[in-house]
Amino acid sequence: MSRIGLGLSSEAWLVSDGARRSVLRLALEGLSWPSTYRAEHVILAALAAHGGPVPEPISGSWEIATWQGAPWSLTSYAAGSPLRASSRVSAAPAIGAFVELLRSVPVDGFGPVNELASPLRGVAEDPRSGLLAWMDGDPFWPFDGTRLRDHPALHDLPDLARTLETQVERIEAAAHAGPMALVHADLHEENILEDGRRLAFIDFGEAFIGSADWEPATLDYFMGWELADQAIGAVGSNPGGSAALGLSFGVHRWRQDRRLGLDEDDYDESFLRSTLARLAGPDVDIAAIDSSRT
């Protein structure tokens, strides 16, 4: 058994048993949030049943009534290495096909997937409640009434904060706009594995049910609008809705980066400015949207 990954909530180990290889994920000690492994297995089973390029669930700690240790999950092994920047363009069609699969899986409700429901069902009855359940108590502007002047980074950029506030109605409307779908919400290079010309998609700990426009919004944050457009344009999207939701996601990620002590201020600010420019139109000067930089 050898360790193959370490994240914010889990460490992953490659387990070999003769010809079969599997992945054991163990929750890190001292986590302040509940494990998502059981819900992830429900999602993986649904996607695998539709031929999705995802690991297949095998077993988990919840299946052992007497288990008292840290939560764990065992799935099949998805071969490959994290997607390289040089592979993004060629990978766009496969990423788009996976997003199309996510949108085709039957879902009901909103928010995190109910680990006991089949078919996939969110734990909430409306999009706003679903998003707040997804955040599990963390601030999520503008759906919980959070004020941007209290944001750890935006309180130093009041003009940018005010510009963002002008988009609240647009963001809330986009979150309620259909169709609703399963959203991975964490499609960055580490969770997209390439093995030759094949891709596999892992780590559904951030997945939820909400507007299909959330996926291009989150994909843009991690890999840029150009890739998001190339990947998802073929399966259809609402660019305005995705950009509006991107503002909410960008504010959330900037708060998270500050909480984790990550120096991503330039990236996070640039993302919000470029997304505002996308909403305003292709010929808008990004810097002109808000000139306050401190």
Image (cartoon, rainbow, N blue to C red):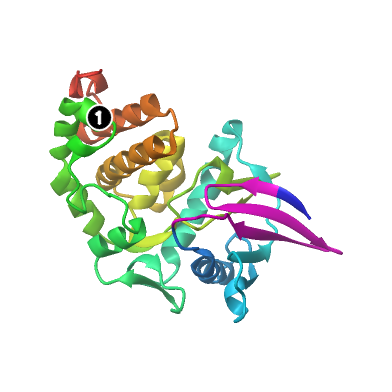
Q: Assign the N terminus to one quadrant of the image.
A: bottom right
Q: Residues within 10 Å of mark 1 (few under 14, many from 20)?
A: some
Q: Position of residue 266 (x, y in %)?
A: 37, 24
Query: What residue is drawn where x is 20% and y is 28%?
Result: 160
Instruction: Locate residue 292: give its quadrant.
Output: top left
The amino acid type, in three-letter code, at marker 1 is Ala
Instruction: Locate residue 262: give its quadrant.
Output: top left
For numbered disc 1, what is the local secondary structure? helix
How many marks the image carries: the answer is: 1
Q: Give the left or right position of residue 89, taking residue 166 as reference.
A: right
Decide which of 56, 157 is in the foreground and name it.
157
The question of residue 166 being in magenta is answered with no
Q: Main secondary structure of the magenta part?
A: strand
Q: Residue furthest bottom?
A: 65
Query: Disc 1 designates what residue?
Result: 277
Q: Give the left or right position of residue 108, taking residue 25 as reference.
A: left
Is residue 235 visible to the viewer in this orientation of the structure? Answer: yes
Q: Position of residue 12 (x, y in %)?
A: 65, 53
Query: What residue is drawn where x is 40% and y is 37%?
Result: 257
Instruction: Locate residue 37: give its quadrant.
Output: bottom right
Query: What residue is drawn where x is 30% and y is 29%?
Result: 274
Q: Position of residue 167 (x, y in %)?
A: 16, 41
Decide which of 205, 84 is in the foreground and name it.
205
Is residue 229 visible to the viewer in this orientation of the structure? Answer: no
Q: Assign the C terminus to one quadrant of the image.
A: top left
Q: Which residues are magenta?
A: 4-32
Give the answer, above or below, for where 147 lies relative to 262: below
The question of residue 12 being in magenta is answered with yes
Query: What residue is drawn where x is 20% and y is 47%?
Result: 146
